[in-house]
Amino acid sequence: MKLAILTITDGQNYGNRLQNYALQEVLRDMGHDVTTIRRRTFHDRTAAQRSVQGAKSLVKAVLGQDYEAPTAARRKAFDAFNRRYLTFSETVLHDNLAPEHFARQYDRFIVGSDQVWNAQFRIIYDDLKNHLAAFAEPRQRIAYAASFGGDVIPEQYLPLFQQELPRFRAVSVREESGVALAERCGAKAEIVLDPTMLLPAERWQRLARRPDFVTDEPFIATYFLGGRTPEVLQNIERIAAGRKVWHLEKEFLPRSAVADMAAFAAAPDEFVWLLSHADCVLTDSFHAAVFSILFHRPFCVFLRAPRDKMPDMSTRMKTLLGQFGLENHLFRSDETDAFSEDYDADAVERTLRQARERSLRFLTEALAPDPHE
């Protein structure tokens, strides 16, 4: 069967690129021909626009002002990962537009994973119809581990969700709140594993690549998408206890906020290596927690502080930790002396094995050919 993955493809986000790779590989393992549909958003600048941005950054540097960290090295690392591991379409979807008869090129469209339905994000609401595969027939649409990113849908986009979600052949989501939101839109959904958890640790170890900047000294890894507050930095220093700290960064940071430019430009396969070899992982990232669990690494999750007009984004993290009985890995400010580094890896593996079976069963049933196909 010829399948197309509809997910977020712009930018340089570790979790996004790794979930895309994982879903592609799982579907290929099932015997399908898989392509990821390329997307274009306001993040995708032309060469001329990048030159202008570079000139502005240079002027700010001369004036002693803060400016965006150089993204060329990071973009190069991510582009190399994409070329090596992922198959993309020639067609680029954007601005709620799709070529005429585009749906005929594929048998099924798999929407997900990641926050493909988080309509608080401009990269989503600018192209929401394509994120809902509105150009395709209902029998072609499947959602796998799709995330709304929180527990609400902005009212202005709710009618479109209520129109399109019931037209999906099958819907699965990544967190408990997604089930309720799908039901509000008239669709039945079930919870499945994020694609990154469908691949065993051994497969990820084969992908992992040691970064050149890493030495043989013990280290801890941090990855904070919500930023490292003074309190977080204080706790990182306390937990590190003199060990080397490699700070993995989100994209689009001011240069002054980047702890180490080499680590800032780490590729997704280097991200996997760092998390698999860290003495400990400190994070507010869903996917950093996922890889910590896959590799049985000690880890501590810091929930992000809520922001004005933004949904509560902790729901997927709480679902993940609750599913594996790891709620005690949430950082609590009233328990700053220690956190639980040890857990029953065998119990985690049993839960993971059962969840994989359920998730793969969902995909198998959703992709089963219709009688007339």
Image (cartoon, rainbow, N blue to C red):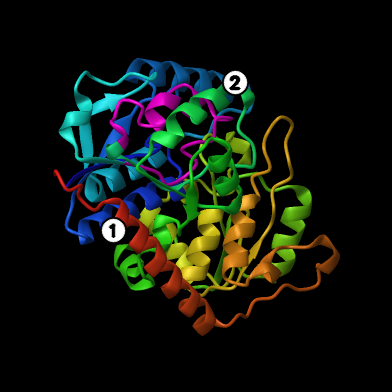
Tell me the amino acid under the disc marked 2. Answer: Gln
Residue 134, magenta (yes or no): yes
Tell me the amino acid under the disc marked 1. Answer: Thr
Q: Which residue lies at the image location 17% right of the left edge and 30% below the top edge?
A: 104
Q: Which residue lies at the image location 38% right of the left edge and 71% below the top edge?
A: 201
Give the x, y percent position of residue 372: 14, 43
**Could you say whether the residue bearing mark 2 is in a helix, strand or loop?**
helix
Marked residue nearer the N-terminal end (2 or 1): 2
Query: 334 above or below 366?
Result: below
Give the x, y percent position of residue 119: 55, 30
- Could you tell me which quadrant the C terminus lies in? top left
User: What span is colored magenta in the figure?
Assistant: 110-138
Label 2 CA crowd tier, 10 Å (few <14, some 14–19, many 20+): few
Which residue is label 2 attached to? 156
Query: 195 above or below 95?
Result: below
Residue 352, magenta (yes or no): no
Q: Quadrant of residue 302?
A: bottom right
Give the x, y percent position of residue 32: 18, 52
Q: Is residue 267 visible?
A: no
The numbered dot on residue 196 is: none
Query: 253 above or below 235?
Result: above
Residue nearer the viewer, 78 or 372: 372
Residue nearer the viewer, 100 or 185: 185
> Is 168 situated left or right of 247 in this image?
left
Which residue is label 1 attached to? 364
Q: Which residue sits furthest front?
A: 371
